Amino acid sequence: MRDYFLWLLFSPFLVFGQRVTLSGYVQEKGNQENLVGVSVALLGNTNGTTTNNYGYYSLNVPVNQTITVRFSALGYAAEEKTFTLTQSVRQDVLLVATAQELQEVRVSEQKESLQAPQMSVVRLSAQQIKQIPALLGEKDVIKAIQLLPGVQKGTEGSTALYVRGGGPDQNLILLDEAQVYNANHLFGFFSVFNGDAIKNVDFWKGGFPARYGGRLSSVIDLQMKEGGKDRLRGEGGIGLLSSRLTLDGPIEKGKSSFLLSGRRTYIDLLTMPLMPKGEKMGYSFYDLNAKLNFDLGPKDKLYVSGYFGNDAFRIRERVERSTSTINYNSGLGWGNATGTVRWNHLFNQKLFLNTTFSVSDFRFKLFDDFERIRTDGGANTSTYTEFTSSIRDYTFKTDFDYFPSNAHQIKFGALLTNHRFKPRAFIEENRVSAAEASDNQTFNNQEFALYAEDTYQHNRFSLNAGLRFNGLRTPTRTYFFAEPRLTISHLLPKNWALKASYARNNQFVHLLTNTGTGLSTDLWVPATERVPPQQADQIAVGITKNFPKAGLNLTIESYRKWMRGIVAYQEGATFLSFNDGAKPLRWEDNVTTGRGWSYGTEVLLQKSKGRLTGWLGYTLSWTIHQFDALNNGKRFYPRYDRRHDFSAVASYKLSPKITLSANWVYATGNALTVPQGFYFVPGGLSRNFIERVDYLGSRNSFRAEAYHRLDLAAQFHKKKRWGERTWEVGLYNAYSRQNPLYYYLRTERTSEGDRTFLAKKALFPVIPSVTYNFKF
Amino acid sequence: MKNALFLLLGLWLVSCDSGVEIERLAPKDLVAVSSFISPQDSIVRVYVYQGKALGDIASLEKALIKDAKVSISDGSVTQNLLFDEKTRSYAISNQLLKVTASKQYALQVSTATGTVLKATCQVPPNPAEVQIDGVKDGNDFIFSYAWPPLEKTAYFTYDFDLTDVLFRPRLGATSGPSFSVIVIAQNNLFDNSDRPSKTIERKVINAFLAEKVSIRTVFNSIDKNTYQFLKTKTDANNWNSNASGFIPILREPQPVFSNVTGGVGVFGGYNQRISTFEIL
């Protein structure tokens, strides 16, 4: 046993005689986009490798022997190449994109995917996301992820994600390696990611490799398209809510490319004519993705990419009265901006480097400007109130991929981020009396990490083992943590595989949220001495089986997660709680920390081949929280504890011209704290009046109605001289289920006295949509 | 393969016990009991009401429980309280109960349906007199309170008014003394952590235009039960006013504090001191 471990430890460094290296990039034929996660297998041998995040592979092959290497990936025709190598060679490979229903998947490839030491991860392609019916036809990456087992959505329409019992802050969202903090447009109904600009999405809900860190519950790693290097392409759509256009093409043919993708809503333009005189109310959002991609030589590549998006809601009103004129101007806005510069360098065929510098900026602003000019000689009023919240990150990151042998693939690297938080800047100004009150806290924290991981394969066994050292320096305290990560996989007979994983994660930012609806009033705040970092341990075991003939894959996973240092608002608190009487309240005074547990079992049956594709997902889960300051210190179910969550997603290619798609979701109702009765008590010590008080029961003891919804869509494709156009018609919430958004008390006055009822607020009835899409 | 399936099944089964206790009393089982006792009361009262379901008429009369057995004990003597039709509460003369500072009391209520509710409280020690520091500013009097020592008064509330006012309007002095707020707290509830930042400074306008005027301060030292009840009740009212069919609630729910086992409500103690400060 000891010898085995010694061999395991030192095998990466053993020099294998009579072997040379075959390496290169795997790209899509035509646009030359680098392809991620392509299986590179040496036929007749159990070992192989996969391309890294930049499409690079490195394989050890025997010298002077004729070998065949198979390159394969879902959505592409497999390519087999035969070599007889006498020395190390660089060989770039082009794969042809193909329709899924035509794809042949070999049993050996099924085994490779089964054996991969990864679990709790799903990769979604842009094509898959585009086939899922969506609200108003707006295709959305985050909404697609919400349909996967283990992921609970927030309230109706929201893009918030609750992964395996974690909160919406516990998801690391990376867009070309830059963090995105608030991924919401239109108060959370749409995410900021334009599907036309996205190439791939990797979604991890457990078993995180050591290269990822900083969040407890999930990683959503989005890669933007690079832009074709062969010719100019375009893609776009005109919808009811917004329109979008993407252009990509070569700057210098075969060597450099660009991508530019924009989207803008026209809600403000459509509603403007409906406004009464003197009143202007409007909402708008836009986003813009841009990317430049340069081949600097055979060993170097440079990528520059950016995202800019903004939401703005504004009300302006002018009221003329006989004695005064009132001018009212109020607004709410938020936006993200990210920028990434990445440099890829090949030191040699076995050592690949990616160095990233990124900037991420999120800002939120709420303002209210009120002016009353008296014409009767009375005192004028003029006040201005502004609330802002912002985060700016500067990150420097370096990642190495080392391919010592076919059995080992080693990744290691380091990260340094400077976080600047301004969680709550507040100004209150009386322009008449010249009185001013303000509050502006700034936090500068430095996050740093070192990591190393090894993916090892030996016959039917494979593992990914890693260690990440994480730390945070705050002005008053420095934290250090070690995070072990392990995923093992064992291939069993008859296409079964058994997998297990363990991961420890720490998180250095918190999200304070009242509603969980993804509203921009949710505040990002840093870990401090009073509110320390969050930590989680997660174990998962699972089995997976492939049914190659039917193109089916079944995965069953059970998980358990322990969370410490999770943050919640105090009872009665709100994001605008600035004082308690005359006592000023900092955000740290409004929050409390506690712990949580979650556990459950997820079943996912995927069909990725044939005319009918899609998946069935079911999750049975429990999430429990315990805070000393909430619910008298007793355990309770948090708002998004869901006992049952089911989703069915299907897409059927009726003919080359028509694609039909549908999804149906069902979820147990949210656990809420709402009045369930009432009683009477004296109003105060004087006992002069008796007051009515609502009875809430214990925290979140009320279950909202179950959520269920059916969405339908049909796509009609037609080839044109200039390219292809697609008309899409859809029905969101096809049977008009009145799903609860929230509950409130409604009072009716009767002759006998007041009656108060608990009323449900539903948002969306059935919503039809028509979208025209084109590409050339 | 079988072993793997058994392992998953085992994990699934051990997942079933969450340890969460959900409290959700049906209105018929929900009884509210409330009483604040103090040495200064001539009559001690206890209010007992049946909880009501949402949709019921909010009628005090329909919620009143008149046939409960109510008693208060100081540990050695237990006194029964009788229902008083006039005040719609259970009452007893304080000459019999003799509520005393720094003493603990236990309240027990048994309803005809078998519900038993219990609560205890401790009456705070006698508070020291509230001191007023003030200066003349033209015709006005600006003053601030010096609160009693911390060790005697952990939580308190207060109220004040002008008393013994003697003012005759005349040319150049048409308005008599009144209060003007310079800095005011949003509520009159204090705990010790508030003291440094909740300094209250006030002004009596035209105080020196009167012939005679005094400030009367009613200072109530309250126990923790009373403080938590009054504070959470205020916050809960704010939560309700934040709820509507137009926008979602952007405030965390605030349950009203209760120290009554077997039901809801409050049993608290307070100790009052009234002081008068003569400006003129």
Image (spheres, rainbow, N blue to C red):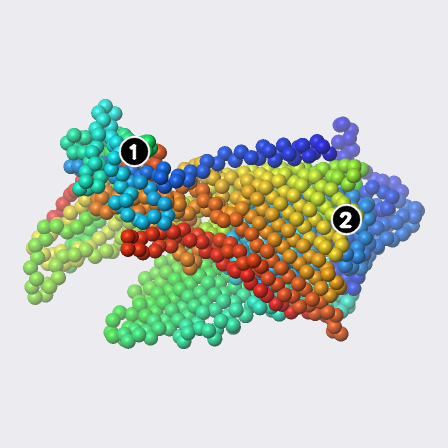
- Determine the secondary structure under disc 2: loop
Q: Is residue B238 left or right of residue A48?
A: left
Q: Is residue A459 left or right of residue B151?
A: right
* Distance Cα–Cα, label 2 vs label 1: 68 Å
**Amino acid type of the residue that numbered disc 1 sits on in the rendered structure:** Thr
Quarter residue A561 falls in: top right
Residue A417: x percent and y percent? Answer: 58, 51
Identity of the residue drawn at 81% across and 53% down: A104
Q: Is residue A502 left or right of residue A766?
A: right
What is the number of the mark on residue A182? none
Tell me the crowding category of disc 2: few under 14, some 14 to 19, or many 20 or more residues within 10 angstroms, Cα based: few
Image quadrant occupied by the N terminus of chain A? top right
What is the number of the mark on residue A550? 2
Residue A604: x percent and y percent? Answer: 67, 46
Residue B229 in the image: above or below residue B99:
below
**Amino acid type of the residue that numbered disc 2 sits on in the rendered structure:** Ala
Q: What is the tally of numbered marks visible in this picture? A: 2
What is the number of the mark on residue B111? 1
